[in-house]
Image (cartoon, helix red, strand yellow):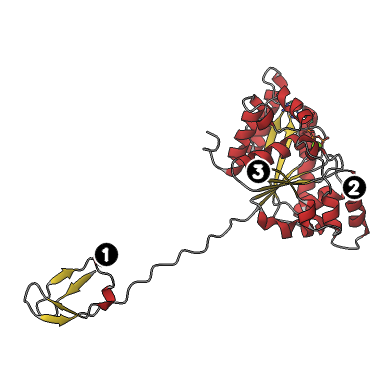
Amino acid sequence: MVITCPYCNKKHALDENRVADPSAIRNARCRGCGKVFQVTLAEPVKKEEAPAAKKATTRAIGVSLSKGGVGKTTTAVNLAAGLALAGYKVLLVDTDTQGQASFMLGVTPKATLTELVTGELPAADVVMEVRDRLWLLAGGKSLAGIKRLIDRKDFGGELTLKEALEPLESDYDYVVVDTSPGWDPLTVNVLFYVRELLTPVSLEVLSLQGLSEFIKSIAAIRKYRKDVALKYILPTFHDKRIKQTTEILDKIEKIYGSRLCAPIRYNVRLSESPAYGKTIYEYAPGCNGAQDYRELIRKVTGNSKLFT
Ligand SMILES: Nc1ncnc2c1ncn2[C@@H]1O[C@H](COP(=O)(O)OP(=O)(O)OP(=O)(O)O)[C@@H](O)[C@H]1O
Ligand SMILES: [Mg+2]
């Protein structure tokens, strides 16, 4: 702080750190002209208050493609588990009657998404902590009950899942939703809930056809819900030895450009890990499958330094 003598204009530096209370200083003697003058301290400049740490909005990502066996559940589980390892709070939601997410994580759920959607149980009794920072809302046969509930609604049936999940969202950084193959009312519900879609495509001609059909379906949904977007195309079962897979990969890259993720290689460890109820990072952390899924986490989070 600088004090100026009103008689000779000499400026004096006042070190605020050496004065207990600068506002208590009333008079000062000028070291230039020797006169005593009254000190008027300017109002301390108020420090800009830091805004309360605002939680970034939760990202809701659906892992979906109508075609079966393309690696949706493998991706949803290892994406969710990888995000949790990276320090994010993640809710994995299984909307498939096969209920494979819980099997892959080696847990037996006491309740499923059905009890949450029907209101039979509160979220606290349904959401299960399965790893550090990773929670699961399990699927399974009982999900047929949700489909019946959706069918019975005269209107708004497509928002059933959104209404059940949105109140929980703020507890998590990511909500990752696994979907069943095919196209049913629950899949439509997922598309009316998530804001981002990640589509695994196994590198074979039939999958490519499945992708173009799926994209048409998303376009139809987007007429009614603008804020869902196909953000990531994830090639799966990549095997460099098979010429056709590389050709298909080139094709997808030309169409989808930056939305294309680095492929997940065909890796036998990925097919073994579910039998042990382990994620790929637990079962074989050094294998190609684990490396490829870590790369996916870097792409989705936009943080190229993760796990390096
Ligand atoms: N990159 C991979 N390399 C080798 N095997 C894999 C790979 N990804 C997935 N698998 C295996 O392929 C099978 C199908 O994978 P997954 O269950 O994830 O597909 P999905 O799309 O969820 O199937 P569905 O449509 O039936 O739900 C599983 O046995 C899984 O362990
Ligand atoms: Mg599946």
Locate residue 2: give its quadrant: bottom left
Q: Which residue is mark 3?
A: 132
Looking at the picture, tell me which residue is in the foreground, 153 or 118.
118
Point 77% across, 56% down: residue? 123
Which label was assigned to residue 266? none
Which circle's residue, 1 or 2, is located before the other in the chain?
1
* First-in-chain label (2 vs 3): 3
Which circle marks residue 17 in the picture?
A: 1
Residue 180, by quadrant, is: top right
Can see residue 158? no
Please, what is the three-letter code of the amino acid marked with disc 3?
A: Asp
User: Mark 1 or mark 2, which is nearer to you?
Assistant: 1
Q: Secondary structure at mark 2?
A: helix
Q: Is residue 299 left or right of residue 158?
A: left
Q: Residue at x 87, y 47 (%)?
A: 184
Q: Secondary structure at mark 1?
A: helix
Residue under label 2: 142
The Cα atoms of the two marked residues, 2 and 3, are separated by: 27 Å
- Where's ligand 2: which quadrant? top right
Residue furthest left in the image: 33
**Residue sitting at x 7%, y 73%:** 32
Distance from the alpha carbon under mark 1 to that under mark 3: 45 Å
In the image shown, does 219 or 202 lie closer to the viewer? 202
Residue 103 is at least partly visible in this image: yes
Query: Which of the image's four quarters has the N terminus?
Result: bottom left
Q: Is mark 2 within 8 Å of ligand 2?
A: no
Considering only vertical position in the picture, is 243 above or below 131? above
